[in-house]
Amino acid sequence: MAEAATDGAADIVIRPVAAGDLPTLLALYRHLNHDDPDMDPQLARDRFAAISAHPGMTIFAAFEGDIAISSVTLVVVPNLTRRGASYALIENVVTHVDHRQRGYARALIEAAVATAWKQNCYKVMLLTGSKEPATLRFYANCGFSQDKTGFQIRRPAAG
């Protein structure tokens, strides 16, 4: 899967991330969680290998040349309800600050959702911690409805 993004830029390609893309992906993730400490390079390679080997898990990115400028992660989860239809989660939606408002995240979300539908998922879920009206509008404009209540629990900090 390699396709041009929606803004008409011929040099933007959307595709799954490969092992050689890890450095540019990690640089992009700095735009998602600014305060996260840098990950040990070997741990990053190990985590990426685990993600790549995990059935149903794909990181999609929009690339300008060799540089990842936007990304989403799709996780397809097998299921025993809904007549065995899987469900999907989208996580880690991020676009480099210099490339926002150009349709890249939307194109990536559309690619992830299309992949979920091809894998017979009955729904795709996405959570956001943002309360920004523009962010919530963006997800609504991508086709998501805000009609469920999400909960989370986070691991306490090690003391």
Image (cartoon, helix red, strand yellow):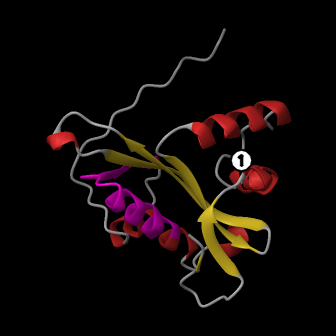
> Tag count in the figure?
1
Give the residues drawn in magenta, as a range.
108-129
Q: Which residue reaches farthest right? A: 41
Residue position marked by numbered label 1 in the rendering: 34
Relative to residue 1, is residue 92 depicted above or below? above
Label 1: how many Cα within 10 Å (few below 14, some 14–19, many 20+): few
The residue positioned 73% from the left and 54% from the top of the image is 25
User: Which quadrant holds residue 157?
Assistant: top right
Task: Say left or right for 97 vs 92.
Answer: right
* Residue closest to the eye, 158 or 71: 71
In-image side of 121 versus 48 (left or right): left
Residue 127 visible somewhere in the drawing: no
Q: Amino acid at mark 1?
A: His
Residue 11 is one of the magenta-drawn residues: no
Image x and y of residue 149, in percent: 25, 42
- 87 is higher (above) or lower (below) than 109: above
Q: Position of residue 120 (x, y in %)?
A: 29, 55
Q: Please name the residue shown 39% across and 66% down the image.
A: 114
Residue occupying the point 21% across, 53% down: 147
